[in-house]
Amino acid sequence: MLSLKQTGLLVLALTLAVFAYWDGLVDAVFRWSNQEEYSHGFLIPLVTLYILWEKKALIQSAIGPPMWSGFVVVLIAIGVFIVGEISALYLLIHYSFVLLLIGLSLVTIGRATKYTYVPLLLLLFAIPLPYVLEVVLTAKLQLISSSIGVDFIRMFQIPVYLEGNVIDLGVYQLQVVEACSGLRYLFPLMSLGFIAAYFYQAAFWKRSIVFLATIPITILMNSFRIGAIGVMVDNWGISMAEGFLHDFEGWIIFMACSVILFIIVWLLEKLTNKGGTLASVFGVVEVTLPDPEKRYVGQSFSKPLLVTIIMLLMAIVLTQFLDKRVENTPGHVSFVNFPMKLDAWQGKHDKLEQRVIDKLGMTDYLLANYRNDSQQLVNFYVAYYQSQRKGVSPHSPRVCIPGGGWEISDLQRITAGNHPINRVIIKKGNQRQLVYYWFQGHGRIVANEYINKWYLLQDAVFKNRTDGALVRVVTSVGPNENIKAADQRLLDFMAQAEPELADYILD
């Protein structure tokens, strides 16, 4: 049992932790409220509290002396938290908070943490992904679900053509948008699978199957949903893919996913434990409490917990100082002023749709079509972000290219214009395009998006700035044109355009 003073210190530590992590927690709640993919996040903390309450007898029976190893965990958590605060990478702050809670458990109830760490790890499923990872995962799931959904439609002898994430039924065209990627099912179902695996009293391999099965179940059932909508649209019109019916189908599919998950548990027991029942493997374990004389009695105070509180106070003071830092954001000249005449190249501004601008979250952008004296066309696109502290950043064109129906036939990382670039050849039917793209900022030009993220973190910590841009140039390749001619065209354009970029993307 914990002493009254230990309980008071634990409450104080939790209060300080919530105060220190407040901005990160608010960001998580904001995304739970505004993104349906994470709306289940409101339930996860409640489920964690319920599991801890349901296991309270086990926890009380196993309480031991506070462990100094828990302070090491707390120290690591606070270190990650400070890095997250400096760089404003909320993902680090969120994971740090869960790690801190495990550390607090170790410095308070010691060895009884073996009954608390799994419910605390459940909180990880409430943490929203960084936007850049979310975009990549969404795009991949869109393409996979579209492809399998079309295979289902063809089973009904319905002529259908798939172009990227657009399903063409002839009279109707269905676009598998981001909301239909399956993420809205994946995250809640993975949470449910984790909870089921935790309560499933079976071998570890069985629990692993239950949890990992949530991924293929989600993909297949979401694909089935897309295919079913296609079949209904072909038979009864486009209204079958809109409004209440569309949303209602979503709920049915999620419930079906949940049922399939428990059917898997039933099958595992039927095949490997013929005498067992679901009631027995999900039953509540009876706990025999130790003799009161042998039970650990908490000290008047825990030294590891007391040191942890001091560390939390120091972290709060430090982060209050960091919060007052104003990010270094260099002056930016609007791309409206970018020259439309570049030697032999004459350009014309183009515009993105507002919904695309809102989705990408960029500060400014340039989209223009340039033609040379031979009327050869180069599309020039620059997405500029004055701050990337809150997870909003440019993502690789490799993510969005397939969604437009284009197929990447070749991708190389080469040197062009005296710096690294990604050289991509894409195809759609008989059409070909050549794409060059790179990431630019702070005097660096980087082709690898992951190395660019590493540099971004470094500069956030040491330079207090996170501005940067994605630069992309594209040209069509004629039916009988040699690809080297297209390469030379892009190189000629880059030689004229890149010096001008120096005024818009500052070192």
Image (spheres, helix red, strand yellow):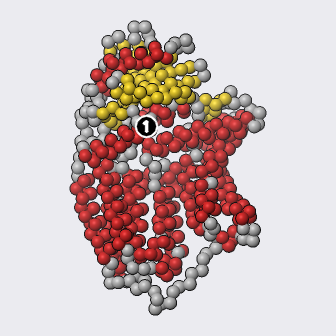
Q: Quadrant of residue 28?
A: bottom left
Give the quadrant of the C terminus: top left
Looking at the image, residue 51 sits to the left or right of residue 421; the answer is right
Q: Is residue 341 shown above or below 170?
A: above
Where is residue 451? Give x, y as percent.
38, 40
Residue corresponding to mark 1: 395
**Residue 460 visible to the viewer:** yes
Residue 305's image quarter?
Answer: bottom left
Please report the residue visible at 40 percent of the width from the left and 11 percent of the height from the top. 372
As displayed, is residue 124 above or below residue 307?
above
Residue lying furthest top: 374
Q: Residue at x 68, y 56 (%)?
A: 260
Image location (x, y in percent) of residue 137: 52, 43
Residue 320 percent across, percent down from the top left: 25, 57
Identify the residue shown where x is 48% and y is 33%: 398
Secondary structure at badge 1 equals: loop
Q: Is residue 225 visible?
A: no
Q: Residue at x 54, y 74 (%)?
A: 54
- Relative height, residue 110 to residue 160 (above, below): below
Residue type marked 1: His
Is residue 61 or residue 127 the one in the foreground? Answer: 61
Classify the position of the N terminus by image quarter: bottom left
Tell me if mark 1 has few (under 14), some (14-19) or many (20+) residues whose alpha carbon lies within 10 angstroms of its own: some
Q: Is 88 placed above or below 70 here?
A: above
**In the displayed structure image, the side of residue 3 where residue 160 appears, left or right:** right
